[in-house]
Image: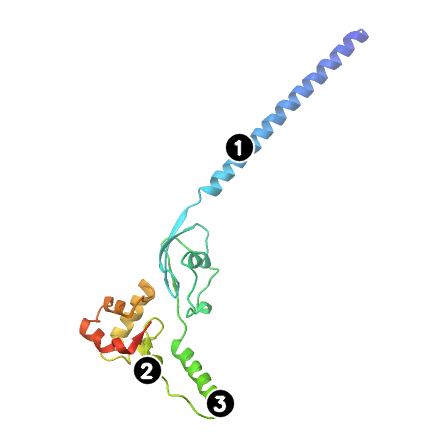
Amino acid sequence: MTLHKRSLLVFLLLAAVIMLGSMYGFYEKDKVAELDEANKLERFSGEMLTVYVTGAVNKPGVVKIKDGARVIDAIEVCGGVLPTADTAKINMAQLVKDGAQVTVPEKNVVLMQQTQANSKAEAARNNGGQVKTSSHSEEKININTADQAELDKLPGVGPATAATIIEYRQKEGQFQSIEDLKKVGGISEAKFKKIADRIKI
């Protein structure tokens, strides 16, 4: 074989190798692009969960969150927790399932108010030993934070009605006015008039 023919053969072999390499490179590039596109579609087409958030949150109700979300995500959609929320009694990191109910409990309001009263009495003693008499407005019961024992003190409100008020508050959220208490089963117009001057929000 002449030198010319050998050179031509080598050139053709090199050209064939280069062409095959280019075709393989394009194939791999297309394959990677297809995988990236599939991953994007999978990422953006995740399921949405429907969850009912109630209790001591700013905006209780039924919300939509992404699959794989946790309790804290559902609560944030509802505007976060109220100052009265007892977050130590709920697992914020727990995964949420579709159709689940997330209830944020409230703190022991009686204990909180007792602590505040003790603080005021201590402050009064430090200011000359005189304890000021509580005003009528301070004696009113806050229907948004009162527990069953406090609500039971209201005229005509027994344990059953007090429990109904708390249940309504957990399901529907905070009362916006004292008149909203009439929406609770067992609170008639006549009963509301008896307790109107003893409650506040």
Q: Residue, x 56% and y 31% (percent of image)?
A: 31
Q: Quadrant of residue 76?
A: bottom left
Residue tagged by mark 3? Answer: 127
- Who comes first in sequence, dot 3 or dot 1? 1
Task: For mark 3, give the secondary structure.
Answer: loop
Q: Which residue is mark 2?
A: 136
Name the residue: 26% across, 69% down.
Answer: 179
Amino acid type at mark 3: Asn
Answer with left or right where residue 184 lies relative to residue 28: left
Please name the residue that numbered disc 1 is placed on.
34
Secondary structure beneath label 2 = helix
Q: Residue 68's x, y, as percent?
A: 46, 51
Drawn side of residue 70 relative to residue 31, left or right? left
In the displayed structure image, the side of residue 42 where residue 196 appears, left or right: left
Most extreme residue toward the top is 2
Image coordinates for residue 180, horizontal then vertical, percent: 27, 67
Circles 2 and 3 in contact, beta carbons < 8 Å? no
The image quadrant that residue 116 belongs to is: bottom left
Q: Position of residue 185 (x, y in %)?
A: 22, 68
**Residue 38 in view, yes or no:** yes
